[in-house]
Image (cartoon, rainbow, N blue to C red):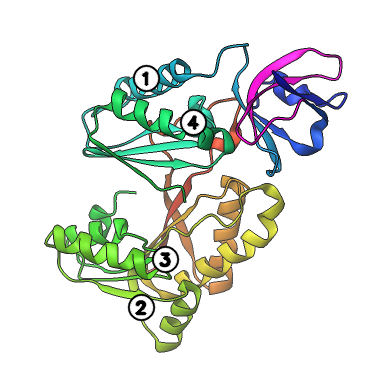
Amino acid sequence: MHALILKPGREKSLKRRHPWVFSGAVAKVQGNPDAGDTVEIRSATGERLAIAAYSPKSQIVARVWDWKEVPIDQDFFHKRIAQAVAQRRVLLDQPDTGAMRLVHGESDGLPGVVADRYADTVVLQLTSAGAERWREVIADKLLEVSGASRIWERSDAEVRALARGRDVLDGFCYSGGFALNACAGGAKSVTAVDSSAEALALARSNAERNKLAPAEWLEGDVFQLLRRFRDQGRNFDLVVLDPPKFAPTAAHAAKAARAYKDINLLAFKLLRPGGLLVTFSCSGGVSADLFQKIVAGAALDAGVQAQIIERLGPGADHPVALNFPEGDYLKGLVCRVAGG
């Protein structure tokens, strides 16, 4: 088998069962592995540490499949996927729900594999060379284990109770999840913005399928549109911000912090007294503590007083392995502006 030999002392994280090997930790590569190939990870003294998928073009040069010398084959993926699905049936209060995350990457022992079930469809996202190499097997096993009839690869907070009777703004609305729930929950008005025309077309289609009250769907840069709303004097009772990942790693945290502060500052300025901000971050490089500090700074600069009335995070179908803190990237706050 091909092997990655680590530099002296760089095996410590693997011995703590962290599933990533960074390129800077590798002293040499034995053999000539291609992207996605299975490789052994060995210490500088030759100790076998793990079996991993090789990704030569990534900063994360290897992602661990297992800590034992096991064959990475169809049976391996069947067992891992079956275990992930079975655990959710035990953990969730409503195991027969039509929407559920089936596989959550490294936390389910399947790095680079994220699979969500919606009714009879599994949506699959593959984000690593190893996952890409086993695409067909992973897709087949997901269908076999879940019993779903189709799979769609996309490798690329309860709003209803909060929305009734309110003017709602959904920033970064994508296919309309929050906006549509606000419509269904009796919102007075819903304005949804996104930079993707394709996403907005999907959101409109979803609204039509569900026979929901019409919303205002606006295409454009969310930062610019919110500045325009501010300049126009528009106000809302509920603002939802669920932007894409601004900081994939801690190295990007400073730049991401500026973006998160900017967008939350604009949101606070658009809220009426007593209004609610439901704000999220899916950036692994921004911790929950840092995210709260960013939002607090945004409120201060906006000249408003706000309280956290609820903290939001992943459900039981998004488990986080204790040895992989990067899996705990989903975080959200429900903030209430004083007054009203």
**Mark number displayed over residue 338:** 3
Q: Which disc number belongs to residue 235? A: 2
x and y, in percent, of residue 153 in the image: 38, 44
Residue 219 or residue 164, whichever sits in front: 219
**Which residue is at the front of the view, 316 or 105?**
105
Measuring 77% from the left and 23% from the top, which residue is drawn there?
A: 12
Question: Whole-Å distance between the Cαs marked 1 and 4?
Answer: 16 Å
Real-space CA distance between mark 1 and mark 3, rounded to the nearest whole angstrom: 48 Å
**In this rendering, which labeled residue sits more in front, label 1 or label 3?**
1
SS class, disc 1 = helix
Report the residue marked by disc 1. 82
Image x and y of residue 269, in percent: 46, 75
Mark 2 or mark 1: which comes first in sequence? 1
Q: Where, by quadrant of the figure, is residue 327 drawn? A: top right
Residue pointed to by mark 4: 134
In this rendering, position of residue 9 left or right of residue 13:
right
Q: Tell us which disc is closer to us: 1 or 4.
A: 4
Q: What stretch is highlighted in magenta?
A: 31-54
Mark 4 neighbour class, 10 Å CA radius: few under 14, some 14 to 19, many 20 or more: some
